[in-house]
Image: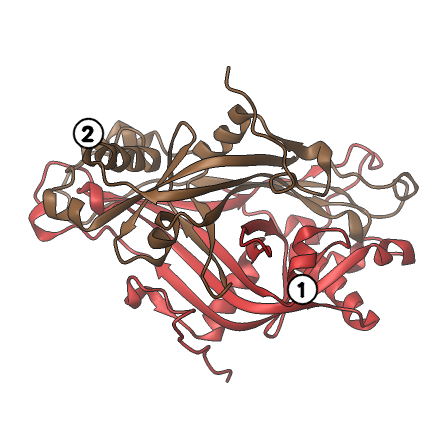
Chain colours: A brown, B red
Amino acid sequence: MSCPFASTERSRPQRSPKRVGFEREPIYAVVDEAPICHVGFTQPDGQPFVIPTIHARKGDTLYFHGSTQSRLLQAIASGNPICCTFTFLDGIVAARSAMHHSMNYRSVVAFGSGHLVTDEAERWEAFELTVEKLIPGRWENCRQPNESEAKVTAIAALKIEEASLKVRSGPVSDIASDLDGPYWAGVIPTEMKVLNPEPDPHLPQGSTTPDHIQALVKPC
Amino acid sequence: MSCPFASTERSRPQRSPKRVGFEREPIYAVVDEAPICHVGFTQPDGQPFVIPTIHARKGDTLYFHGSTQSRLLQAIASGNPICCTFTFLDGIVAARSAMHHSMNYRSVVAFGSGHLVTDEAERWEAFELTVEKLIPGRWENCRQPNESEAKVTAIAALKIEEASLKVRSGPVSDIASDLDGPYWAGVIPTEMKVLNPEPDPHLPQGSTTPDHIQALVKPC
């Protein structure tokens, strides 16, 4: 069994402590389900940036790919502190009172620092992990990178040092004196839907959608 | 007509310039449609944080609410530089080649600095804007804040100084020599669905869902 992350001044959300956890398994469930994350880094002049990007994970390491010229990749590779946030919206919480409106969500905030990956075997594994993260089963069903494509693609690894998961779920939490009020209350669930694939116009006529693509679809 | 934001070293994404725009109208369309954003700030020790939160907008100003003790609210109110990012995932792009896999997306990255709002009229307007942003029509259909609720809720305003919109849309962009290859290619669209409301168990029997709630639902 893996041990939980430490609860530190940095990683511990200050509000609603009951919603917060530090166990690796539920944290990584969110990281692995999230199609993207938002990476935060700070430039030398103190300006923070938040950039959405695709990630992959192996153990406590996140992998990011991009152009060798990318500001994001350079920031992760620099070794400076990084924050990486993974968020799902699960519902709109319509309370009777304005101030108890909320959202249901799952959100992981992870901290660490990165480096450029130069080992060719690890780079290749990161390519594969990234494609498989986007579409499980895809790596063996696409043309794998050639030498020149690999050359212009940087891989940065980020070791997760601390992380926390914050979750709000369940019904509205109005105060007792509002419960008999005249207002409707409830939760309006939200979710990310994956719709029917749109085949590329250049495919030969009669091409069928392969299983690994069809498996992505969450039908209504 | 409002003028576009300036394209600066800070606001100009370095990759794929054809995907980038600085016009206010499409930028604010994304900001207003996004149910949440990811706010980036840097602590004095250089550690960046990325926190998801609900926002509201009026003109070039974003409003954020929270506990007066909130790290996020304090960071925005501090006047230090902030980055605020709004992201939609519109599809998974399955190219024939591993390296041309991508996502369709719309993403706004906005920069500015904030302050604590102390004017009571502006605070009240921000409360209303925030509830209306979450659920249009809700402010007149819920119990509005009382004095003690308002007192413990801080409002921070962020003036947007610069912002850019980056969009990827449309089909896969494989290289010509891959088009006749054996691999399936296409786009698998994704979207945020709003599902049927779950009424609060404490509602009186026979309560009907009001129009302003039903209007949120995007049926399959």
For this view, does B51 lie left or right of residue B94?
Answer: right
For this view, does B96 lie left or right of residue A136?
Answer: left
Numbered mark located on residue A36 in the image: none
Q: Amino acid at mark 1?
A: Ser
Visible residue check, residue A77: yes
Q: Position of residue B117 (x, y in %)?
A: 75, 68
Q: Quadrant of residue B124?
A: bottom right
Q: Secondary structure at mark 1?
A: loop
Q: Which residue is mark 1?
A: B78
Which residue does the image show at 46% across and 62% down from the upper left? B108
Image mark 2: chain: A
Q: Position of residue B58 (x, y in %)?
A: 64, 71
Q: Secondary structure at mark 2?
A: helix
Q: Position of residue B207 (x, y in %)?
A: 79, 40
For label 2, the crowd category at 10 Å Cα-Cα, with few meaning under 14, some 14 to 19 and many 20 or more, is few
Q: Quadrant of residue A56?
A: top left
Labels 1 and 2 share a subunit: no
Which residue does the image show at 60% across and 69% down from the upper left? B113
Task: Determine the residue located farthest toward the front in the rendered image.
Answer: B45
Image mark 1: chain: B
State which mark lies toward you, 1 or 2. 1
Which residue does the image show at 45% across and 38% down from the upper left? A34
Q: Pick the residue in front: B68 or B24.
A: B68
Visible residue check, residue B136: no
Q: CA distance from mark 1 to mark 2?
A: 50 Å
Numbered mark located on residue A140 in the image: 2
For this view, does B14 lie left or right of residue A174?
Answer: left
